[in-house]
Amino acid sequence: MQKEIPYKIYLDETELPREWLNLRAFMHEKPAPLLHPQTRRPMTKDELAEIFCDELAKQEADDTSPFIPIPQAVRDFYKMYRPAPLIRAYCLEKELNTPAKIYYKFEGNNTSGSHKLNSAIPQAYYAKAQGLKGVTTETGAGQWGTALAMACAYFKLDCKVFMVKVSYEQKPFRREVMRTYGATVTPSPSVTTAVGREILDRFPGTGGSLGCAISEAVETARSLDGYRYELGSVLNQVLLHQSVIGLESKTALDKYGEKADIIIGCAGGGSNLGGLIAPFMAQQLEGKAKYRFIAVEPASCPTLTRGKYAYDYCDTGKVCPLSKMYTLGSGFIPSASHAGGLRYHGLTSTLSALYNQGLMEARAVKQTEVFSAAEYFARVEGILPAPESAHAIRVAIDEALECKRTGERKTILFGLTGTGYFDMYAYEKFHDGKMQDFSPTDEELKASLAQLPKL
Protein backbone atom coordinates (compact mmCIF):
# COMPACT_ATOMS: atom_id res chain seq x y z
CA MET A 1 0.00 0.00 0.00
CA GLN A 2 1.32 3.45 -0.93
CA LYS A 3 2.46 5.58 1.97
CA GLU A 4 0.24 8.58 2.62
CA ILE A 5 1.74 11.89 1.47
CA PRO A 6 1.46 14.85 3.86
CA TYR A 7 -0.90 17.29 2.13
CA LYS A 8 -0.87 21.00 2.83
CA ILE A 9 -1.11 24.06 0.60
CA TYR A 10 1.53 26.64 1.57
CA LEU A 11 0.71 30.25 0.63
CA ASP A 12 2.71 33.45 0.65
CA GLU A 13 1.49 36.82 1.89
CA THR A 14 -0.55 37.37 -1.30
CA GLU A 15 -2.16 33.91 -1.00
CA LEU A 16 -0.15 32.58 -3.93
CA PRO A 17 0.95 28.95 -3.61
CA ARG A 18 4.63 28.63 -2.75
CA GLU A 19 4.82 25.17 -4.34
CA TRP A 20 3.43 23.39 -7.37
CA LEU A 21 1.63 20.09 -6.78
CA ASN A 22 2.95 17.08 -8.71
CA LEU A 23 -0.13 14.90 -9.19
CA ARG A 24 1.90 11.89 -10.33
CA ALA A 25 3.40 11.54 -6.87
CA PHE A 26 -0.08 10.83 -5.45
CA MET A 27 -1.00 8.21 -8.06
CA HIS A 28 -0.97 4.58 -6.98
CA GLU A 29 -0.59 3.42 -10.58
CA LYS A 30 1.94 5.73 -12.24
CA PRO A 31 1.63 6.69 -15.91
CA ALA A 32 3.80 4.66 -18.28
CA PRO A 33 7.17 6.32 -19.08
CA LEU A 34 7.92 8.28 -22.22
CA LEU A 35 9.74 6.16 -24.80
CA HIS A 36 12.59 7.23 -27.07
CA PRO A 37 11.28 7.51 -30.66
CA GLN A 38 14.18 5.46 -32.06
CA THR A 39 15.18 2.96 -29.36
CA ARG A 40 11.64 2.59 -27.91
CA ARG A 41 13.21 2.48 -24.44
CA PRO A 42 12.18 4.71 -21.52
CA MET A 43 13.60 8.21 -21.94
CA THR A 44 16.32 9.18 -19.48
CA LYS A 45 16.60 12.63 -17.96
CA ASP A 46 19.68 13.29 -20.13
CA GLU A 47 17.79 12.33 -23.28
CA LEU A 48 14.90 14.59 -22.31
CA ALA A 49 17.43 17.42 -21.78
CA GLU A 50 18.36 17.20 -25.46
CA ILE A 51 14.88 18.56 -26.21
CA PHE A 52 13.88 20.48 -23.07
CA CYS A 53 15.69 22.74 -20.61
CA ASP A 54 17.60 20.80 -17.95
CA GLU A 55 15.28 21.70 -15.06
CA LEU A 56 12.18 20.98 -17.14
CA ALA A 57 13.61 17.58 -18.10
CA LYS A 58 14.10 16.89 -14.39
CA GLN A 59 10.51 17.87 -13.63
CA GLU A 60 9.25 15.75 -16.51
CA ALA A 61 10.88 12.64 -15.08
CA ASP A 62 9.79 13.27 -11.48
CA ASP A 63 6.90 11.14 -10.28
CA THR A 64 7.88 11.00 -6.60
CA SER A 65 8.13 14.62 -5.33
CA PRO A 66 4.62 15.65 -4.22
CA PHE A 67 5.46 19.36 -4.08
CA ILE A 68 8.08 21.37 -5.98
CA PRO A 69 9.03 24.93 -4.89
CA ILE A 70 8.07 27.77 -7.23
CA PRO A 71 11.15 29.96 -7.89
CA GLN A 72 10.91 33.46 -6.42
CA ALA A 73 11.31 35.10 -9.86
CA VAL A 74 8.32 33.11 -11.14
CA ARG A 75 6.21 34.00 -8.11
CA ASP A 76 7.13 37.65 -8.57
CA PHE A 77 5.73 37.51 -12.11
CA TYR A 78 2.66 35.55 -10.99
CA LYS A 79 1.83 38.46 -8.68
CA MET A 80 1.06 40.58 -11.75
CA TYR A 81 -2.15 38.60 -12.34
CA ARG A 82 -2.52 35.99 -9.60
CA PRO A 83 -4.29 34.82 -7.54
CA ALA A 84 -6.88 34.54 -10.32
CA PRO A 85 -10.49 35.01 -9.21
CA LEU A 86 -12.81 32.17 -8.27
CA ILE A 87 -16.26 33.51 -9.11
CA ARG A 88 -19.67 32.26 -8.14
CA ALA A 89 -22.02 32.42 -11.12
CA TYR A 90 -25.00 33.84 -9.25
CA CYS A 91 -26.62 35.20 -12.41
CA LEU A 92 -26.26 31.90 -14.24
CA GLU A 93 -27.70 29.98 -11.29
CA LYS A 94 -30.70 32.32 -11.23
CA GLU A 95 -31.25 32.16 -14.98
CA LEU A 96 -31.13 28.35 -14.97
CA ASN A 97 -33.33 28.21 -11.85
CA THR A 98 -31.09 25.47 -10.50
CA PRO A 99 -30.48 24.48 -6.88
CA ALA A 100 -26.83 23.89 -7.82
CA LYS A 101 -24.07 26.30 -6.86
CA ILE A 102 -21.80 27.12 -9.80
CA TYR A 103 -18.24 28.42 -9.42
CA TYR A 104 -15.71 29.10 -12.13
CA LYS A 105 -11.99 29.78 -11.96
CA PHE A 106 -11.30 32.64 -14.39
CA GLU A 107 -7.88 32.52 -16.02
CA GLY A 108 -8.42 35.24 -18.62
CA ASN A 109 -7.29 38.29 -16.65
CA ASN A 110 -3.88 38.65 -18.28
CA THR A 111 -2.75 39.86 -21.69
CA SER A 112 -2.31 36.34 -23.06
CA GLY A 113 -5.99 35.85 -22.31
CA SER A 114 -5.65 32.39 -20.82
CA HIS A 115 -4.11 30.03 -18.26
CA LYS A 116 -1.11 29.37 -20.51
CA LEU A 117 1.01 32.08 -18.88
CA ASN A 118 1.19 29.93 -15.72
CA SER A 119 3.60 27.55 -17.48
CA ALA A 120 5.15 29.95 -19.99
CA ILE A 121 6.78 31.99 -17.24
CA PRO A 122 8.59 29.12 -15.48
CA GLN A 123 9.59 27.57 -18.80
CA ALA A 124 11.15 30.84 -20.00
CA TYR A 125 12.73 31.35 -16.57
CA TYR A 126 14.48 27.97 -16.68
CA ALA A 127 15.66 28.61 -20.26
CA LYS A 128 17.17 31.95 -19.22
CA ALA A 129 18.77 30.44 -16.11
CA GLN A 130 20.40 27.82 -18.33
CA GLY A 131 21.90 30.54 -20.53
CA LEU A 132 19.96 29.69 -23.69
CA LYS A 133 19.49 32.11 -26.58
CA GLY A 134 15.90 31.25 -27.31
CA VAL A 135 13.12 28.69 -27.54
CA THR A 136 10.76 27.25 -30.13
CA THR A 137 7.18 26.15 -29.69
CA GLU A 138 3.86 25.44 -31.36
CA THR A 139 0.46 27.00 -30.77
CA GLY A 140 -3.06 26.04 -31.75
CA ALA A 141 -5.55 28.83 -31.13
CA GLY A 142 -2.67 31.13 -30.18
CA GLN A 143 -2.99 31.41 -26.40
CA TRP A 144 0.16 29.39 -25.67
CA GLY A 145 2.18 31.17 -28.34
CA THR A 146 1.07 34.52 -26.95
CA ALA A 147 1.92 33.49 -23.39
CA LEU A 148 5.39 32.23 -24.32
CA ALA A 149 6.06 35.33 -26.41
CA MET A 150 5.22 37.45 -23.35
CA ALA A 151 7.44 35.34 -21.10
CA CYS A 152 10.35 35.46 -23.53
CA ALA A 153 10.05 39.23 -23.86
CA TYR A 154 10.20 39.49 -20.07
CA PHE A 155 13.33 37.32 -19.83
CA LYS A 156 14.83 38.65 -23.10
CA LEU A 157 14.82 35.38 -25.05
CA ASP A 158 14.19 34.80 -28.74
CA CYS A 159 10.89 33.02 -29.41
CA LYS A 160 9.98 31.12 -32.59
CA VAL A 161 6.35 30.01 -32.84
CA PHE A 162 4.81 27.56 -35.31
CA MET A 163 1.09 28.33 -35.39
CA VAL A 164 -1.40 25.81 -36.77
CA LYS A 165 -2.25 27.16 -40.22
CA VAL A 166 -6.04 27.17 -39.82
CA SER A 167 -5.72 29.23 -36.61
CA TYR A 168 -3.03 31.45 -38.21
CA GLU A 169 -5.66 32.37 -40.82
CA GLN A 170 -8.69 32.48 -38.50
CA LYS A 171 -7.01 34.50 -35.72
CA PRO A 172 -4.74 37.16 -37.29
CA PHE A 173 -4.93 39.43 -34.25
CA ARG A 174 -3.66 36.70 -31.94
CA ARG A 175 -0.74 36.35 -34.35
CA GLU A 176 -0.06 40.08 -34.14
CA VAL A 177 0.00 40.06 -30.35
CA MET A 178 2.78 37.45 -30.52
CA ARG A 179 4.69 39.61 -32.98
CA THR A 180 4.17 42.62 -30.71
CA TYR A 181 6.05 40.71 -28.00
CA GLY A 182 8.88 39.98 -30.45
CA ALA A 183 8.06 36.42 -31.50
CA THR A 184 8.51 35.08 -35.04
CA VAL A 185 5.28 33.36 -36.12
CA THR A 186 5.19 30.77 -38.94
CA PRO A 187 2.03 29.02 -40.20
CA SER A 188 2.31 25.24 -39.87
CA PRO A 189 2.85 23.07 -41.81
CA SER A 190 5.47 25.22 -43.51
CA VAL A 191 8.23 24.81 -46.09
CA THR A 192 10.86 25.94 -43.58
CA THR A 193 11.35 22.45 -42.10
CA ALA A 194 11.84 19.00 -43.56
CA VAL A 195 8.90 17.59 -41.63
CA GLY A 196 6.68 20.48 -42.73
CA ARG A 197 7.48 19.85 -46.38
CA GLU A 198 6.80 16.15 -45.93
CA ILE A 199 3.39 16.81 -44.38
CA LEU A 200 2.48 19.24 -47.16
CA ASP A 201 3.41 16.60 -49.72
CA ARG A 202 1.15 14.06 -48.00
CA PHE A 203 -1.72 16.46 -47.28
CA PRO A 204 -1.72 19.31 -49.85
CA GLY A 205 -3.70 22.31 -48.66
CA THR A 206 -4.05 21.01 -45.10
CA GLY A 207 -4.95 23.39 -42.30
CA GLY A 208 -2.43 21.60 -40.10
CA SER A 209 -2.69 20.29 -36.56
CA LEU A 210 -0.94 20.67 -33.22
CA GLY A 211 0.94 17.46 -33.98
CA CYS A 212 2.34 18.99 -37.18
CA ALA A 213 3.36 22.22 -35.45
CA ILE A 214 5.08 20.33 -32.62
CA SER A 215 7.20 18.42 -35.13
CA GLU A 216 8.32 21.62 -36.83
CA ALA A 217 9.15 23.33 -33.54
CA VAL A 218 11.22 20.38 -32.31
CA GLU A 219 13.13 20.11 -35.60
CA THR A 220 13.90 23.84 -35.51
CA ALA A 221 15.11 23.73 -31.89
CA ARG A 222 17.44 20.84 -32.67
CA SER A 223 18.90 22.65 -35.66
CA LEU A 224 19.79 25.84 -33.74
CA ASP A 225 22.59 26.14 -31.20
CA GLY A 226 21.44 27.47 -27.81
CA TYR A 227 17.75 26.70 -28.35
CA ARG A 228 15.34 24.28 -26.70
CA TYR A 229 11.76 23.30 -27.41
CA GLU A 230 8.98 24.29 -24.98
CA LEU A 231 5.49 22.80 -24.95
CA GLY A 232 2.29 24.35 -23.60
CA SER A 233 0.37 21.21 -22.71
CA VAL A 234 0.48 17.37 -22.57
CA LEU A 235 3.70 17.04 -20.52
CA ASN A 236 3.99 16.43 -16.78
CA GLN A 237 6.04 19.61 -16.34
CA VAL A 238 3.14 21.67 -17.74
CA LEU A 239 0.52 20.02 -15.53
CA LEU A 240 2.85 20.72 -12.61
CA HIS A 241 2.98 24.46 -13.33
CA GLN A 242 -0.76 24.64 -14.01
CA SER A 243 -1.51 23.19 -10.58
CA VAL A 244 -1.63 26.79 -9.34
CA ILE A 245 -5.15 26.87 -10.83
CA GLY A 246 -6.42 24.05 -8.65
CA LEU A 247 -4.44 25.06 -5.57
CA GLU A 248 -5.93 28.56 -5.65
CA SER A 249 -9.41 27.15 -6.37
CA LYS A 250 -9.25 24.82 -3.40
CA THR A 251 -7.91 27.55 -1.12
CA ALA A 252 -10.82 29.82 -2.08
CA LEU A 253 -13.46 27.10 -1.73
CA ASP A 254 -12.08 26.17 1.70
CA LYS A 255 -12.33 29.83 2.68
CA TYR A 256 -15.97 29.91 1.56
CA GLY A 257 -16.66 26.68 3.45
CA GLU A 258 -17.58 24.98 0.19
CA LYS A 259 -16.71 21.56 -1.26
CA ALA A 260 -17.02 20.95 -4.99
CA ASP A 261 -19.04 17.88 -6.00
CA ILE A 262 -18.37 18.09 -9.75
CA ILE A 263 -15.22 19.52 -11.36
CA ILE A 264 -15.30 20.18 -15.10
CA GLY A 265 -12.62 21.24 -17.59
CA CYS A 266 -12.13 21.27 -21.34
CA ALA A 267 -9.69 18.65 -22.59
CA GLY A 268 -7.20 19.11 -25.41
CA GLY A 269 -3.68 18.19 -24.42
CA GLY A 270 -4.74 18.32 -20.77
CA SER A 271 -2.91 21.29 -19.21
CA ASN A 272 -5.84 23.29 -17.83
CA LEU A 273 -7.86 20.24 -16.82
CA GLY A 274 -4.86 18.65 -15.10
CA GLY A 275 -4.04 21.89 -13.31
CA LEU A 276 -7.61 22.45 -12.16
CA ILE A 277 -8.18 18.96 -10.74
CA ALA A 278 -4.68 18.43 -9.28
CA PRO A 279 -5.26 19.05 -5.54
CA PHE A 280 -8.77 17.60 -5.63
CA MET A 281 -7.65 14.42 -7.38
CA ALA A 282 -4.71 14.18 -4.95
CA GLN A 283 -7.18 14.26 -2.07
CA GLN A 284 -9.32 11.60 -3.70
CA LEU A 285 -6.32 9.36 -4.33
CA GLU A 286 -5.47 9.71 -0.63
CA GLY A 287 -9.01 8.63 0.26
CA LYS A 288 -9.75 11.99 1.92
CA ALA A 289 -12.56 13.19 -0.38
CA LYS A 290 -14.71 12.13 -3.32
CA TYR A 291 -15.39 14.14 -6.48
CA ARG A 292 -16.74 13.70 -10.00
CA PHE A 293 -14.24 14.83 -12.64
CA ILE A 294 -15.53 15.47 -16.16
CA ALA A 295 -13.25 16.05 -19.16
CA VAL A 296 -15.02 17.78 -22.07
CA GLU A 297 -13.66 17.41 -25.59
CA PRO A 298 -14.87 18.40 -29.07
CA ALA A 299 -16.83 15.82 -31.04
CA SER A 300 -14.51 16.64 -33.95
CA CYS A 301 -11.48 15.43 -31.96
CA PRO A 302 -12.88 12.78 -29.56
CA THR A 303 -9.65 11.54 -28.01
CA LEU A 304 -11.06 10.04 -24.81
CA THR A 305 -14.52 9.02 -25.98
CA ARG A 306 -13.44 7.34 -29.23
CA GLY A 307 -9.66 7.01 -29.02
CA LYS A 308 -7.45 4.13 -27.96
CA TYR A 309 -5.22 3.84 -24.89
CA ALA A 310 -1.85 2.99 -26.39
CA TYR A 311 1.68 4.23 -26.95
CA ASP A 312 1.76 6.83 -29.72
CA TYR A 313 3.95 9.64 -30.97
CA CYS A 314 3.26 13.04 -29.48
CA ASP A 315 3.68 14.66 -32.90
CA THR A 316 2.77 14.04 -36.52
CA GLY A 317 6.39 13.98 -37.69
CA LYS A 318 7.28 11.22 -35.18
CA VAL A 319 10.35 12.99 -33.85
CA CYS A 320 9.08 13.43 -30.27
CA PRO A 321 8.93 10.76 -27.56
CA LEU A 322 6.16 8.19 -27.53
CA SER A 323 3.60 8.54 -24.75
CA LYS A 324 1.06 6.02 -23.51
CA MET A 325 -2.14 7.97 -23.77
CA TYR A 326 -5.60 8.06 -25.23
CA THR A 327 -4.99 8.90 -28.87
CA LEU A 328 -6.64 9.12 -32.28
CA GLY A 329 -3.30 8.46 -33.97
CA SER A 330 -0.46 10.93 -34.50
CA GLY A 331 -1.40 11.23 -38.17
CA PHE A 332 -4.98 12.26 -37.38
CA ILE A 333 -5.70 15.80 -38.57
CA PRO A 334 -8.93 17.14 -37.05
CA SER A 335 -11.42 19.20 -38.99
CA ALA A 336 -11.02 22.96 -38.99
CA SER A 337 -13.09 23.53 -35.85
CA HIS A 338 -12.83 26.83 -34.00
CA ALA A 339 -11.52 25.46 -30.68
CA GLY A 340 -7.95 25.39 -31.94
CA GLY A 341 -6.49 24.61 -28.52
CA LEU A 342 -8.40 21.31 -28.39
CA ARG A 343 -7.35 20.01 -31.81
CA TYR A 344 -4.74 17.57 -30.51
CA HIS A 345 -4.74 13.86 -31.27
CA GLY A 346 -3.82 12.72 -27.73
CA LEU A 347 -4.21 13.53 -24.04
CA THR A 348 -1.46 13.79 -21.44
CA SER A 349 -0.37 10.43 -20.06
CA THR A 350 -1.25 11.51 -16.51
CA LEU A 351 -4.92 12.18 -17.24
CA SER A 352 -5.07 9.25 -19.66
CA ALA A 353 -3.96 6.92 -16.86
CA LEU A 354 -6.53 8.40 -14.45
CA TYR A 355 -9.29 8.00 -17.04
CA ASN A 356 -8.20 4.45 -17.77
CA GLN A 357 -8.37 3.72 -14.03
CA GLY A 358 -11.98 4.92 -13.95
CA LEU A 359 -11.25 8.07 -11.95
CA MET A 360 -12.55 10.53 -14.57
CA GLU A 361 -15.50 10.82 -16.94
CA ALA A 362 -15.38 12.14 -20.50
CA ARG A 363 -17.93 13.83 -22.70
CA ALA A 364 -17.72 14.92 -26.35
CA VAL A 365 -19.80 17.91 -27.50
CA LYS A 366 -20.60 19.49 -30.86
CA GLN A 367 -19.27 22.96 -31.58
CA THR A 368 -22.70 24.50 -32.32
CA GLU A 369 -23.82 23.34 -28.86
CA VAL A 370 -20.61 24.79 -27.43
CA PHE A 371 -21.12 28.21 -29.01
CA SER A 372 -24.76 28.23 -27.94
CA ALA A 373 -23.55 27.82 -24.34
CA ALA A 374 -20.81 30.44 -24.86
CA GLU A 375 -23.32 33.02 -26.10
CA TYR A 376 -25.71 32.23 -23.26
CA PHE A 377 -22.94 32.55 -20.68
CA ALA A 378 -21.73 35.87 -22.16
CA ARG A 379 -25.23 37.34 -21.99
CA VAL A 380 -25.86 36.13 -18.45
CA GLU A 381 -22.45 36.37 -16.76
CA GLY A 382 -20.86 39.15 -18.83
CA ILE A 383 -17.65 37.37 -19.89
CA LEU A 384 -17.05 36.38 -23.51
CA PRO A 385 -15.46 32.92 -23.21
CA ALA A 386 -12.88 31.31 -25.44
CA PRO A 387 -14.26 28.43 -27.57
CA GLU A 388 -12.12 25.99 -25.59
CA SER A 389 -13.51 27.20 -22.25
CA ALA A 390 -17.05 27.05 -23.61
CA HIS A 391 -16.81 23.26 -23.77
CA ALA A 392 -16.65 23.24 -19.97
CA ILE A 393 -19.45 25.80 -19.79
CA ARG A 394 -21.67 23.58 -21.94
CA VAL A 395 -21.35 20.62 -19.58
CA ALA A 396 -21.53 22.79 -16.43
CA ILE A 397 -24.90 24.09 -17.66
CA ASP A 398 -26.02 20.54 -18.46
CA GLU A 399 -25.07 19.36 -14.97
CA ALA A 400 -26.81 22.35 -13.35
CA LEU A 401 -29.99 21.54 -15.32
CA GLU A 402 -29.73 17.93 -14.18
CA CYS A 403 -29.66 19.22 -10.59
CA LYS A 404 -32.78 21.22 -11.40
CA ARG A 405 -34.47 18.04 -12.63
CA THR A 406 -33.47 15.96 -9.60
CA GLY A 407 -33.55 18.70 -6.97
CA GLU A 408 -29.97 17.91 -5.86
CA ARG A 409 -27.99 20.80 -4.36
CA LYS A 410 -24.58 20.07 -5.81
CA THR A 411 -21.62 22.43 -6.08
CA ILE A 412 -20.12 22.64 -9.56
CA LEU A 413 -16.65 24.01 -10.32
CA PHE A 414 -15.44 24.56 -13.88
CA GLY A 415 -12.42 26.14 -15.49
CA LEU A 416 -12.96 29.29 -17.55
CA THR A 417 -9.56 29.11 -19.17
CA GLY A 418 -9.64 32.33 -21.16
CA THR A 419 -11.48 35.00 -23.10
CA GLY A 420 -12.77 34.85 -26.66
CA TYR A 421 -12.05 38.34 -27.91
CA PHE A 422 -9.69 37.02 -30.58
CA ASP A 423 -12.26 34.44 -31.65
CA MET A 424 -14.85 36.76 -33.17
CA TYR A 425 -14.52 35.10 -36.58
CA ALA A 426 -15.88 31.94 -34.96
CA TYR A 427 -18.66 33.83 -33.21
CA GLU A 428 -19.53 35.48 -36.54
CA LYS A 429 -19.87 32.04 -38.18
CA PHE A 430 -22.14 30.93 -35.36
CA HIS A 431 -24.34 34.04 -35.47
CA ASP A 432 -24.64 33.86 -39.26
CA GLY A 433 -25.71 30.23 -39.12
CA LYS A 434 -22.65 29.11 -41.08
CA MET A 435 -21.00 27.04 -38.36
CA GLN A 436 -20.97 23.31 -39.02
CA ASP A 437 -20.53 20.35 -36.73
CA PHE A 438 -17.82 17.84 -37.60
CA SER A 439 -17.31 14.33 -36.35
CA PRO A 440 -14.83 11.81 -37.78
CA THR A 441 -16.31 8.62 -39.17
CA ASP A 442 -15.52 5.25 -37.66
CA GLU A 443 -13.65 4.41 -40.85
CA GLU A 444 -11.45 7.52 -40.56
CA LEU A 445 -10.56 6.73 -36.95
CA LYS A 446 -9.95 3.08 -37.74
CA ALA A 447 -7.54 4.02 -40.52
CA SER A 448 -5.70 6.48 -38.28
CA LEU A 449 -5.47 4.10 -35.32
CA ALA A 450 -4.18 1.36 -37.61
CA GLN A 451 -1.00 3.44 -37.95
CA LEU A 452 -0.17 3.33 -34.23
CA PRO A 453 3.41 2.17 -33.60
CA LYS A 454 3.82 -1.54 -33.00
CA LEU A 455 5.77 -2.06 -29.79
Image (spheres, rainbow, N blue to C red):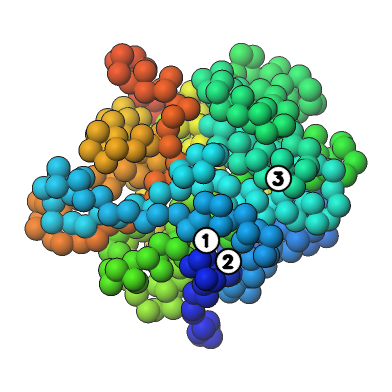
Q: Is residue 150 left or right of residue 261?
A: right
Q: Is residue 421 above or below residue 205?
A: below
In the foreground, 77 or 388: 77
**Lower sequence index among marks 2 and 3:** 2
Residue 46 location in percent, x, y?
Answer: 83, 60
Q: Amino acid at mark 2?
A: Trp
In the foreground, 74 or 309: 74
What crowding class fits label 1: few (fewer than 14 Cα within 10 Å), some (14-19), or many (20 or more)?
many
**Residue with the mark numbered 1:** 243
Can see residue 310?
Answer: no
In the image, what residue occupies the spot 45% across and 63% down? 248
> In whole angstroms, how far apart are the C-alphas of marks 2 and 1?
6 Å
**Lower sequence index among marks 2 and 1:** 2
Q: Residue furthest right?
A: 225
In the image, what residue occupies the spot 37% across and 18% down? 428
Quadrant position of residue 371: top left
**Lower sequence index among marks 3 and 1:** 3
Can see residue 419?
Answer: yes
Residue 57 location in percent, x, y?
Answer: 74, 58
In the image, what residue occupies the spot 58% across and 70% down? 18
Instruction: Indicate which disc residue 284 carries.
Output: none
Residue 235 location in percent, x, y?
Answer: 62, 53
| Circle 3 or circle 1, nearest the eye | 3
* Pointer 2 with pointer 1, Cβ within 8 A: yes
**Residue with the mark numbered 3:** 154
**Residue with the mark numbered 2:** 20
In the image, what residue occupies the spot 73% across and 54% down? 125
> In whole angstroms, how far apart are the C-alphas of marks 3 and 1?
22 Å
Residue 225 location in percent, x, y?
Answer: 90, 41
